[in-house]
Amino acid sequence: MEKLKTRIAKRAAKELNDGDVVNLGIGLPTLVANNLPEGISIILQSENGIMGMGEKKDETDPNIVNAGAQPVSILPGGQFFDSATSFALIRGGHVDATILGALQVDEHGNLSNWIIPGKMVPGMGGAMDLVTGAKKVIVAMLHTQKGAPKILKECTLPYTALHCVDMIITEMGVMRVTEKGIVLEEIHPDYSVEDVQNATG
């Protein structure tokens, strides 16, 4: 499972450009920080008030954490600020890309990623702001959940935001959301087109 998640994180990292300000969602997307391509410099932002976040390392200060409460490092020149400033940056359109997970994505680019009705949830987090404020929204996730498709014709879980997802990256391939629906642009050699279709709603 971890191998698949790392594969997804490495592929998602290739969508980032030198100098981008990028927000990484909790869970799988945090692996992107440790899998950035060589030769590019990315400014990682965390909605709990960090700009210039680095990799997670064993010697990381446990008092410095990302939005998922995981210890992270801070790069030289990194900054700390309050949540109001952090969300002003996000809502002001200063985040070039956000990479986040999803419970469901549908062919219209609608996103459901914050709650399964009847289950405990700590809160919506920053996803609603990020997917409407970031210039590019990339969903990085496993293609299915216990065999059930997560990419659907229409989401069945409560929405986080509508028409916001630009790209979906899973262990099976890379998909772009277009006006005509979801287009499979890349496929991993381990899978066939039929495999992807069978795992997709």
Image (cartoon, rainbow, N blue to C red):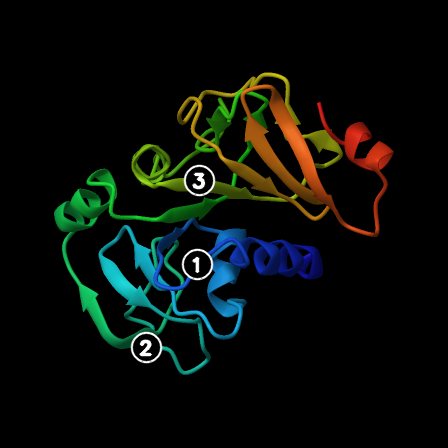
Give the mark nearer the N terminus: 1 vs 2. 1
Give the mark nearer the N terminus: 2 vs 3. 2
| Quadrant in the picture for residue 44 | bottom left
Residue 142 drawn at (x, y percent): 65, 44
27 vs 181, left or right, is: left
- Helix, strand or loop at label 3? It is strand
- Residue beneath label 3, please? 137
Residue 77 drawn at (x, y percent): 21, 75
- Helix, strand or loop at label 2? It is loop
> Compared with residue 47, is residue 102 higher up or lower down, i.e. above or below?
above
11 vs 3, left or right, is: left
79 vs 131, left or right, is: left
Using the numbered discs, state the Cα–Cα distance from disc 2 to disc 3 in whole angstroms: 30 Å
126 vs 150, left or right, is: left
Nearer the observer, disc 1 or disc 3? 1
- Residue beneath label 1, please? 17
Tally the numbered discs: 3
Please report the residue visible at 35 percent of the width from the left and 74 percent of the height from the top: 73
The C terminus sits in image quarter: top right
- Decide: few, some or many residues near mark 1? Use Cα within 10 Å; few <14, some 14-19, many ≥20: some
Amino acid type, residue under disc 1 in the picture: Asn
Amino acid type, residue under disc 2 in the picture: Asp
Amino acid type, residue under disc 3 in the picture: Val
Please report the residue visible at 59 percent of the width from the left and 22 percent of the height from the top: 107
